[in-house]
Image (spheres, grey):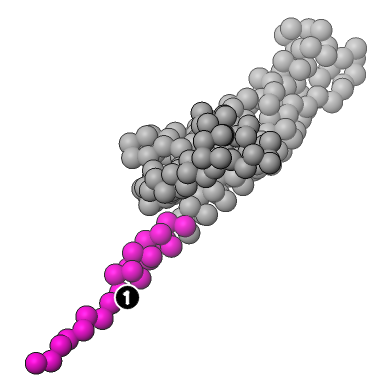
Amino acid sequence: MGYVSAVPVPQPRAARAAVPGGGRRSLAAALFLGALGATVVLLSAGQIWAEGTASVGGGTVPVEADGGTVTGVPTALAIVGLAALFAVFAVRRTGRTLVAALLALSGAGAALAAVLGASDRAALDAEAARISGDTAAAVAGLSHTVWPYVTAAGAVLILLAGLFALRFGKSWPAMGGRYERSGAPRAARKAAQADPDRPEDLWKALDRGEDPTHGA
């Protein structure tokens, strides 16, 4: 009577590996887009957005306003988005979806605020009034730079990072996931005995609530 030996088939393993690979690619893309977008927003918001002149004592003086003076919304939302980008890995399931939505909304809000700020003149009028001492003074020769639109472009990158997180976030790892799936690393640390010749090991054992003299 013949015997048939079972040969392991590697296909299921390869199929399982394909999902983490795609998750890693989307994760890298989201991290890159989000970090780059936040950096662009924070840097460009500090540049000059609007320029003009104010009448002072029969003459004119130049006035200008940076992005933070025109509107502080893009900077604030970029910081929120950056925090949400890294918070995505600290939560799971519904929490991850909510944080990803916050990331996307931060990018959308920052982009909208930057575009609206590109045509704003209130900041320059206020600067003209301050320089001239006339509260009714208005800026003349108003012009805007390209920086509001650069800010908006950076905000769009944050928005894209949020959309990536909403679409692919379920396949991304979470902080401490390795320890939640298996208790082996935690058990290995607990089983390790402190070396009495190494004071730092004794202190670490005490911090973990263990008896460093046990088993000595």
Locate residue 176, reporting x and y percent: 46, 42
Compared across the picture, whether 45 is left or right of 80 comes to: right
Res. 94 in view: yes
* Residue 181 lies within the magenta run: no
Compared across the picture, whether 102 is left or right of 75 comes to: left
Outermost front residue: 216
Q: Which residues are magenta?
A: 1-24
Outermost bottom residue: 1
Task: Provide the residue designation for mark 1.
Answer: 10
> Which quadrant of the figure contains the N terminus?
bottom left
Other residues around mark 1 within 10 Å, as few (<14) / some (14–19) / many (≥20)? few
> Which quadrant of the figure contains the C terminus?
top right
Vertical relation: 23 (above or below) 68: below
Q: Nearer the viewer, residue 136 or 101?
A: 101
Locate residue 125, reporting x and y percent: 71, 18
The amino acid beneath tag 1 is Pro
